[in-house]
Amino acid sequence: MPETASTPSGGTSRESFGSRLGAAMALRGPLCVGIDPHPALLAGWGLDDDAAGLRRFSLTVLEAVGSLAAAVKPQVALYERHGSAGMAVLEELLAVARDESILTIADAKRGDIGSTMAAYADAWLRDSSPLAADSVTLSPYLGFESLRPALDLAAEHGRGVFVLALTSNPEGASVQHVGGADSVARRITEAAASENRRYEGALGSVGLVVGATVGSALTDLQLDLQAVRGPILAPGLGAQGATPADLRRTFGTAYPQVLGTSSRDILAAGPGVPELQAAARRTLDGLRGA
Amino acid sequence: MPETASTPSGGTSRESFGSRLGAAMALRGPLCVGIDPHPALLAGWGLDDDAAGLRRFSLTVLEAVGSLAAAVKPQVALYERHGSAGMAVLEELLAVARDESILTIADAKRGDIGSTMAAYADAWLRDSSPLAADSVTLSPYLGFESLRPALDLAAEHGRGVFVLALTSNPEGASVQHVGGADSVARRITEAAASENRRYEGALGSVGLVVGATVGSALTDLQLDLQAVRGPILAPGLGAQGATPADLRRTFGTAYPQVLGTSSRDILAAGPGVPELQAAARRTLDGLRGA
């Protein structure tokens, strides 16, 4: 059974992102570690809030968790804060992860239309781009279909996307819950399900971002995440309030698709590599036992 | 009458962005020139699609239209395509514009929550940031209120934001029009109106992005843009299909707040500075006469 994306252009022989991520989750467990060089974490590690500090922080996290987590998720905003020097550090982090076959999710939440959206796709999902990641997070305020250039480029190059669907910040409801039975979040979810029909295998390459602490909103809004057949990136484990048991309760039958994401809880254990690894293992044990 | 933002922290003595932009629009006319180094435009100018080509393109456009337009709007995606080298060119463009007091709108469409949103605000709206612009475009899928760190930092530093509200791409309606009389676009518009109450003077510093070709959607969705009392960034002039007369018809009583944005129509006249200036003047004449 071919597991590559079934696109006509056949730009690559790389396995599809969904397939690669599914294999990593089966092998290592459903943990994604956020690489979030927040100023407070840098200070806690005794590092300066500059490009050198970012670099040391980023490469240390990768060294510690690269062989434990199914994927790592650098938070792009925290590199962008340092301008081009920060983006150069992100490039280095992504290059090292590529060399070591560690799956990456660039948490960029990009979104635009037409040729501008194509440029964002180019930046994060094109083979020769200095910022090429295995996948990127996208924001659909301009409509799910506005993301088309990224959906297609990802499919061609064996990469993936995670589209913002339903988040747990209280103000998110003012957009995502609007529309009653045909809510914005439900439209995004159904569009992702439809898009994943182009992929064979258990897991498509079009994932969603759904907060780990959304509570009953999934059932209230009647979102069928299992039907999406894509990975669910669920930020909010640990410091943000969700336990692995919450994750299983919230996601129910879609739990096997869920990639639990922890950042601060693990990162605060640094700068020692053994301490970071112990924290990641604890989180993984929780997710496996959940 | 003080025109600075009335914030308690008083981080700056710079005039508010809304006031500075209003003055520039009154003096020069309501034109914003997009700086969009698309691959096709670079090729048309005889430039390579690399950082050196980007730099030549960007600085030429700034030289040509910096004294004609009320503001320039670099499209961040087209710099990000080139990774950190492209972002370094954007830094240089923003620095030259700062030195020459040319107002800038970084078209980045960023959006996130909490400390991550604060990091994006830091990147684009903090005085000492290498990417500091006079204003930045934001995307509100996570709720208008999730943009709070940028709204507050902009107010403190005399900078501004343009929040995506209603766009003219056909797929935009699947999010923005949802909710009937209490649509997503209307919620964003009303939140911006409320936010602008912190600003004195004619124009607040919280603008909206509303497509120049939205047609009757403004009245269909009952959006009161005049009540927003902020600048309206209206992309779509020229190559994308709208004439200055369309702009006046679409925006009606809110037309004095509208900053018409043209990119390709003007940029395609390059690489000669006189030709770029002639194209910008033609567009300006159209906007003034509309």
Image (tube, coloured by chain):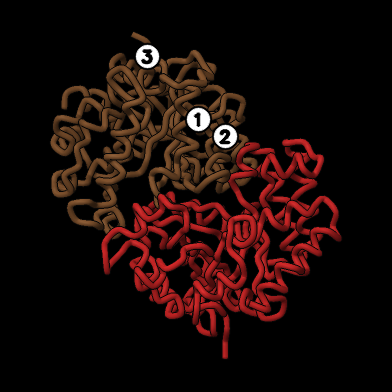
Chain colours: A brown, B red
The mark that comes first in sequence, 3 or 2, is 3
The lab-note entry on whether marks 3 and 2 share a chain reads yes
The mark that comes first in sequence, 3 or 1, is 3
Task: Return the residue at label 2.
Answer: A122
What chain is tagged by disc 1? A
Dot 2 and dot 1 residues touching (CB under 8 Å): yes
Task: Name, please, the residue furthest toward the bottom.
Answer: B1
- Mark 3: give few (<14), some (14-19) or many (20+) Cα within 10 Å: many
The lab-note entry on whether marks 3 and 1 share a chain reads yes
Look at the numbered disc 1 and give the secondary structure of its residue.
helix
> Label 3, label 1: how many angstroms apart (C-alpha)?
17 Å
Pick the front one: A238 or A49: A238
Residue A260 seen from this side = yes
Task: Return the residue at label 1.
Answer: A153
> Label 3, label 2: how many angstroms apart (C-alpha)?
23 Å
Look at the numbered disc 2 and give the secondary structure of its residue.
helix
Badge number at residue A3: 3
What chain is tagged by disc 3? A
